Amino acid sequence: MNRPIPAIAGRRLANGVLAMSAVVAMGLAATAAAGGRAADARSGAKGERTVNEWLTRMHDASRQRSYVGTFVVSSSNGSMSSSRIWHACDGQRQVERVESLSGAPRSTFRKDDEVFTFLPESRTVRSERRESLGPFPELMRPAESAIAEYYTAQRIGGDRVAGFEADIVQVLPKDALRFGYRIWSEKKSGLVVKMQTVDDGGKVLEQAAFSELQLDAPVRMERLEQMMAVPDGWRVEKADAVKTTAAAEGWALKAAVPGFKPMNTYKRPSEGVLQWTFSDGLASVSLFVEAYDRQRHAQEGVFPSGATNTLTHRVGQEWWVTAVGEVPAQTLKAFAVSLERRR
């Protein structure tokens, strides 16, 4: 059975960069945590890094270290994907190439907020800008982060991953609206080399890890930028996303979902879809709103896939919302029932 997800949501889940959901989530969280580090440190146990300090260290490593590696993502539903990653940075800018090793052939290049996806079977290049990808996704501004209010972090041991010694850090939510994480952080640099997303019973929903990794590899930023050139005869598809606000489009939440703050809002005229994104600094939720179509929107419900849940829900008589996020189903339900049309 095909899951009833709008085209834009389906592309988001399938994209080679976003498929690395675990590492993406950690980069996002760490950026958000930086602003609250000093205050959180005062409340931490003596000799223990706080949640903000752990995540900030991991984020800094991604900005300072170049690497090449093979990355594997596996889910509890049995799905698995792998990619080859070339990551170059100079402390300010980052350029990355992700080559899929499973599924349909594709190459994704990210240069700061520019993303180019090369699809050789159709000789097509998709071009778009994504603020959420930043230098390792930074949806939240540091001053707005309240991550320590909703998560705790503790080192629970050590292990070896891809030949590197790593600390194992357990990040647990303080309520039932979020998943927990176990993160393997390379001891010397702090780079995330493995991560598991776990439910409230400790079951692993998704795992992402490097099976092979070369730290400080001689990856030239200029060479990766040259490879982003569009080959002759290929078609370029540019996303038609227009930045807007939920209020300007007539939408609001009757009640906020604890910890989740509204981030970006985009509308895509060609698809008739509005995307409204929320984040708690670590987990994120996207609401895709479109006009109700009796033929396409026949089934309401929750559709789990590893750590990602998708919820579909009819709003009134005229609208259809698809909520997607690496959060428990009850979190998506809270968003769906709170969404209302103001005009």
Image (cartoon, grey):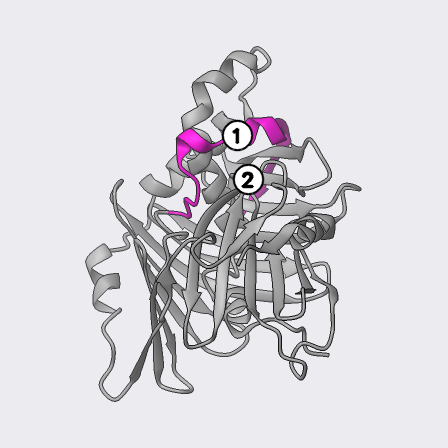
> Taking 8 as reference, is 151 left or right?
right
Q: Quadrant of residue 80?
A: bottom right
Give percent across and percent down for residue 170: 64, 33
Q: How many marks?
A: 2
Task: Name the one closer to the observer, 290 or 85.
Answer: 290
Looking at the rendering, the stretch of residues picked out in magenta corresponds to: 136-161
Q: What is the number of the mark on residue 146?
A: 1
Question: Most extreme residue toward the front, as rendered?
Answer: 343
Q: Quadrant of residue 232?
A: bottom left
> Taking 114 as reference, is 48 left or right?
right
Amino acid type at circle 2 is Asp
Tag 1 or tag 2, which sits nearer the N-term?
1
> Taking 305 as reference, is 94 left or right?
left
Identify the residue under disc 2.
280
Q: What is the number of the mark on residue 20?
A: none
Label 2: element kind: loop
Q: CA distance from mark 2 to mark 1?
A: 7 Å
Label 1: element kind: loop
Q: Quadrant of residue 268?
A: bottom left
